[in-house]
C-alpha cells in the first residue's frame, strides 16, 4: 500500500482522470440544465429564480473566448485540481501522513459524484469548491491560532452562498465544532462574528434580488427542498441508496460509520472531520422524510468524508486497507462505467426493456444539435416557443442564438423566463412551437403567431434507437 500511495502516483491518477473529464466535457452535448445555466450567463444578474448567480458568472468567464461545450464546463475541471490540492493540504495537516493524504485525494476523485458528476456544470461545482475552501480555512485557524483566517473563511462562506443555498450548512457545522472544543475561546473575540458578517455581505445581492422579486427564489428552493406532505421513512432508504451510488457503496458505508465513531473519540482532528460531513448528510436524510433529496444535494459532505474514510481505513489494519482498496475500485468502476455509457451507450438497456432504454438519463446529452439543425432548415425561423426552460436554452445554444428559445410564462411558469420578456425585435418574425412531453399536449400556438401552419414530428435517434419525438408547429408573424 505504501508503494502505491505516493505523491507521484497520486499526481498521475489526477492527470489521467482530468484528461478523461476533458474528453467527456468536449464531446458530450450540453445537458438541459447546463444549457439553462449557460443562458443565465448571457443574462447576468444578481440572482435567479432557481439558484444564486455564481455558476452563471463562472460560465461567462470560461466562455469569453469560446462557447464550445468544453469551455462551458471548464470550471468543473479546474475545481477538480483545486479541491485535490485542498484535500492534500488538509489531510496532511490532520494526519502528518503522506500515504493518508494521497488516499484522501484518490478517494475523492474516483467517486461518481466528483469524477462523473462534476463533468456537468451546475451550482454544485462552485459550492463544492468554496465549501471545501471554507473547511480548509477554518483548520488554519485551529492549527495556527491566527485571527486573519476567520476572514478567509468569511470570503469562502460568502462565495459558497453565492453558489447554492445549501452552503448555509457550513455555519452550523463549524459552530458545533467550535462550541464542543477549546476553539470556543474564539467566541469571546470579534473575529468569528466579523468573518460571518463578511460572508453574509457577499450574499446581500441575492437577498436584494429576492426582495424585488417577491422572495421567489427563497420560496421555490424552500418548497423544492423541504416541501412535501406526510413523512415516509422509506424515502430515507432511497436517499441512502442514492448516496451509495454517488460515492460508491463501500466508501459511503465506511465513511458514514466512521463519521459516527469519530464523534465519540477524544481526538480533535477526527471530531473536525465528522462535524464537517455528518451534519450535512443528516440534514438531507431528515429532509428526505418528506421529500427524497436528490443524490447530489449533500455533495458538500464529501470533501471531508473522503479524508475521514481514508483516515479510518488506512490506520495500519490490513483488513481495513483492503476494504479501502476494494471501495476505491468499486467507485472508480461506477464512475468509468457511467462515463462510458454516457458517451458510448455501453449498457444494452434495450435488451431489458424498451421503456428503460427511453428513460435512460444519459439520453439528455443527445439530440440537441440535431434538433437545432432541423429548426434551421427554414431560415425564416427566428423564435421557438417551448414548454420547458431547458429546451428553450438548448435551442438558443445550438443555433448560436440565430433562433431564440422562449417559454411563455402565461402557460408554463417558465422559471427564470418568468422575468425575461420576449425581445421586441422578434415581433412579426416567423417561428415554431415545439414540445415533446406527451402529457403537456400541443402548445397554444395561436397565442404566439398570427397564423399557424402544419405540425410535424421530429424524432431523435441515439445508436439506432428513438429516444425522443418532438411536435413542431410552424407559425408566421410572431405577435
Image (tube, helix red, strand yellow):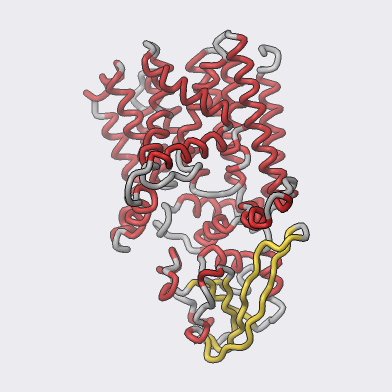
Q: Is residue 425 above or below residue 361?
A: below
Q: Is residue 8 above or below residue 37?
A: above
Residue at 52% from the left image edge and 20% from the top image edge: 91
Query: Residue 52: x and y, percent?
Result: 41, 52
Number of marks in picture: 0
Q: Residue furthest left?
A: 188
Q: Quadrant of the N terminus?
A: top right
Residue at 70% from the left image edge and 33% from the top image edge: 15
Q: Does the rendering let one see residue 216?
A: yes
Between 1 and 198, the one lying in front of the other is: 1
Query: Residue 207: x and y, percent?
Result: 31, 53
Q: Is residue 144 left or right of residue 95?
A: left
Q: Is residue 176 left or right of residue 119?
A: left
Residue at 43% from the left image edge and 64% from the top image edge: 415
Residue at 50% from the left image edge and 83% from the top image edge: 448
Q: Is residue 138 left or right of residue 13?
A: left
Report which quarter residue 160 is drawn in. top left
Between 157 and 320, the one lying in front of the other is: 320
Report which quarter residue 428 is drawn in. bottom right
Between 29 and 146, the one lying in front of the other is: 29
Report which quarter residue 179 is drawn in. top left
Q: Residue furthest front?
A: 352
Query: Residue 408: x and y, percent?
Result: 46, 74
Q: Is residue 119 above or below residue 9?
A: below
Between 283 and 191, the one lying in front of the other is: 283
Q: Is residue 208 above or below residue 247?
A: below
Amino acid at each position: 500500500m505504501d508503494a502505491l500511495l505516493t505523491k507521484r502516483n497520486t499526481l498521475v491518477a489526477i492527470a489521467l482522470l482530468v484528461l478523461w473529464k476533458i474528453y467527456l466535457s468536449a464531446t458530450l452535448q450540453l445537458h438541459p440544465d447546463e444549457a439553462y445555466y449557460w443562458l443565465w450567463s448571457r443574462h447576468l444578474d444578481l440572482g435567479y429564480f432557481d439558484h444564486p448567480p455564481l455558476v452563471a458568472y463562472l460560465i461567462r468567464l470560461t466562455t469569453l473566448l469560446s462557447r464550445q461545450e468544453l469551455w462551458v464546463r471548464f470550471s468543473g475541471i479546474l475545481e477538480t485540481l483545486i479541491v485535490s490540492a485542498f484535500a492534500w493540504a488538509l489531510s496532511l495537516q490532520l494526519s502528518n501522513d503522506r500515504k493518508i493524504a494521497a488516499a484522501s485525494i484518490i478517494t475523492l476523485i474516483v467517486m461518481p459524484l466528483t469524477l462523473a458528476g462534476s463533468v456537468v456544470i451546475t451550482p454544485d461545482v462552485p459550492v463544492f469548491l468554496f465549501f471545501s475552501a471554507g473547511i480548509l480555512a477554518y483548520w488554519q485557524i485551529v492549527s495556527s491560532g491566527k485571527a486573519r483566517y476567520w476572514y478567509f473563511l468569511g470570503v469562502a462562506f460568502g462565495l459558497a452562498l453565492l453558489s447554492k443555498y445549501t452552503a448555509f450548512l457550513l455555519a452550523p457545522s463549524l459552530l458545533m465544532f467550535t462550541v464542543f472544543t477549546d476553539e470556543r475561546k474564539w467566541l469571546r473575540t470579534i473575529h468569528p462574528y466579523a468573518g460571518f458578517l463578511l460572508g453574509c455581505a457577499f450574499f446581500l445581492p441575492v437577498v436584494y434580488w429576492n426582495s424585488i422579486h417577491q422572495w421567489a427564489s427563497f420560496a421555490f428552493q424552500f418548497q423544492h427542498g423541504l416541501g412535501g406532505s406526510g413523512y415516509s421513512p422509506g424515502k430515507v432508504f432511497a436517499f441512502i441508496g442514492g448516496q451509495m451510488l454517488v460515492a460508491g457503496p463501500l466508501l459511503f458505508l465506511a465513511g458514514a460509520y466512521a463519521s459516527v465513531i469519530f464523534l465519540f473519540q477524544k481526538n480533535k482532528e477526527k471530531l473536525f472531520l465528522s462535524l464537517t460531513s455528518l451534519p450535512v448528510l443528516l440534514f438531507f436524510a431528515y429532509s428526505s422524510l418528506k421529500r427524497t433529496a436528490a443524490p447530489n444535494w449533500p455533495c458538500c459532505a464529501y470533501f471531508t468524508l473522503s479524508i475521514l474514510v481514508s483516515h479510518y481505513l488506512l490506520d495500519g489494519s490490513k483488513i481495513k486497507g483492503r476494504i479501502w482498496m476494494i471501495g476505491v475500485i468499486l467507485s472508480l468502476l461506477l464512475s468509468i462505467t457511467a462515463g462510458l455509457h454516457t458517451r458510448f451507450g455501453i449498457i444494452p438497456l434495450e435488451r431489458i426493456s424498451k421503456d428503460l432504454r427511453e428513460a435512460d438519463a444519459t439520453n439528455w446529452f443527445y439530440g440537441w444539435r440535431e434538433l437545432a439543425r432541423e429548426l434551421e432548415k427554414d431560415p425564416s425561423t427566428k423564435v421557438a416557443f417551448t414548454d420547458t426552460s431547458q429546451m428553450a436554452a438548448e435551442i438558443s445554444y445550438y443555433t448560436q442564438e440565430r433562433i431564440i428559445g422562449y417559454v411563455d410564462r402565461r402557460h408554463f411558469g417558465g422559471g427564470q423566463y418568468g422575468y425575461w420578456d420576449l425581445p421586441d425585435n422578434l415581433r412579426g418574425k416567423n417561428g415554431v412551437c415545439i414540445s415533446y412531453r406527451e402529457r403537456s399536449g400541443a402548445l397554444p400556438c395561436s397565442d404566439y403567431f398570427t397564423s399557424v401552419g402544419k405540425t410535424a414530428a421530429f424524432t431523435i435517434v441515439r445508436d439506432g434507437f428513438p429516444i425522443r419525438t418532438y411536435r413542431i408547429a410552424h407559425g408566421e408573424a410572431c405577435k
